[in-house]
Image: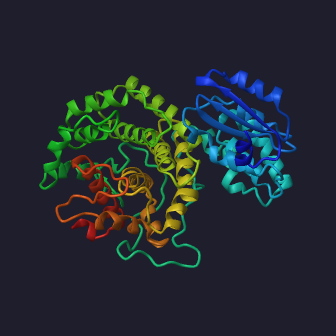
Amino acid sequence: MERQQAALGAAAATVLFCAVCGAAERGDLTGYIRERSKPGDTVYVEVGGRSVRAALVKADEEGIAASLMGMEIPQNWYDIGDRQLLLMARRLAGDEDGEALLLLYRFAIRREELKDEAVKLEGTLKERFPERFDAPKHQESVKPAASEEKPPGDEIQGDIPVLPVAAAGGTTPGPFLKAPRGTYEGIFRGHPKIFVRDGDREPGFGISLGELRRRARTAPWSAFTGRLREAPEEPVHYSAPNLAMSWLATGNESAARRAIEIIKQPIRMDGTTYMGDHLEAVCIAYDWLYNYPGFSEEDKRAVRESILRSAEQMRRIMHDHAWHTRPYAWANGVMFAGLALYPEEPRAEALARAAVEQYKRYLIPARQMHDGAWQNSMAYGRKYMVRSVFHALSAWTSATGEDLWYHAAVDGNWTERMLYMLIYACRPDYSYVTYGDFYQSGWTAETKSYNNLLSGTYGTRNPYGQG
């Protein structure tokens, strides 16, 4: 008990409550906290072996901490912003600079069930710590975006924060990407739009559907169409985009039917990076299969509902932090959902807005801070974080016209530095170095590396990646 108190850094009394294997229901847990604690107490709760930390802050006029403890306990601690809560608890002795209140506010605005408390906290922050409250960064999560009230089909107005052409103070453009390949024009209304644009007019970034189908009949690209038809059944939803591309490029109806059956399956929401990757794959396949005659309206509606459920859940947790692979994959899931479901789904625009803002305000600055370095070695770093970043930049650029790759080039050229890791790690026999937590080096693993390599090469226009 003393160690727990010391770890939490709280001068107030600590209440320890254990409920084995989720035996405590939401109502029971809330009641327990309210009956046995008072403002100023730190509360440490363990449910089924998973720790949840919260605190009743001094002068807790909003009653926010007790409300936090009334949440349904998730299976994975990343889902509840545990790091923010722990930091808040360590500052309980005296919140002189408003840091604890700000952390509570940031946590509350991500939870639908805490919206009322978030509004109260917003008022307290504005009154007591106005310098702490950054309205452009936080306010939108409390008040519904105007775009959510528009009828379906309206284009996004120009209020998504568009990245500047150059960072303040001026930076040198990357050596190979000399100019943006388009300007922001709103989300493309047709399908497909992710990486591939419907029609015959070549977009500034990506490829038109007409050109894709022409290349599918022309060497050397035609060599890959057979592989698409024989796409392996990868875990859960991963194989769906390959099968959807087989139909999109060659008209393979058997592949289309298989892909539809895959994306109709529930998306696994287990709190890991996988759930973002799975949602992204389902969204790509949905977009590419949208015009397939065998994709019935009933099936489309079912897939849309599945995508929306998953995307809304990820939207609430994608803000956790910027140094793990999960927030990148979760932001991708939300972004791809918004792009794929637009304009048929009224909430699609808000999802796309939320995800691109998360990238521009948090995730891209984190990558800039690392100057192109990437953590987690050639396993999780390559498989998840690098892939998620490259895919997000390409998907947004292809679907809206805003060239995020160019913005990265003029803001330190960090994407090209990320790419060089993949170029330099490739050995003469085209296999990859196995070190750190890189757990395998086989065809499946190498394919992921080559996909990232090609994606980064196209995005940055780097000639060395083409060799």
x 40%, y 69%: residue = 417
**Left/right of residue 462 with respect to residue 280 in the rendered view:** left
Q: Quadrant of the N terminus?
A: top right
**Looking at the rendering, which quadrant does residue 285 occupy?**
top left
Q: Is residue 286 left or right of residue 26?
A: left
Is 115 left or right of 329, judged from the image as shown? right
Can residue 142 be seen at all in this image of the molecule?
yes
Against 92, is 149 above or below? above
Q: Can you give x and y, in whole percent of width and height, for residue 418 in the image?
A: 39, 64
In which quadrant of the rendered image does the C terminus lie?
bottom left
Q: Position of residue 192 (x, y in %)?
A: 35, 44
Tally of marks: 0
- The residue located at (64%, 41%) in the rendering is 110
- Spot occupied by residue 386 in the image (x, y as percentages of width and height): 40, 56
Residue 246 drawn at (x, y percent): 22, 40
Q: In terms of image quadrants, where is residue 43?
A: top right
Measuring 29% from the left and 59% from the top, which residue is drawn there? 454
Q: Observer-nearest residue: 458 or 95?
A: 95
Residue 254 to residue 279: above or below = above
Compare residues 384 and 231 and report the one nearer the observer. 384
Is 402 situated above or below 213?
Answer: below
Q: Is residue 65 above or below residue 319?
A: above
Q: How is the image coloured?
A: rainbow
Q: Is residue 106 visible?
A: no
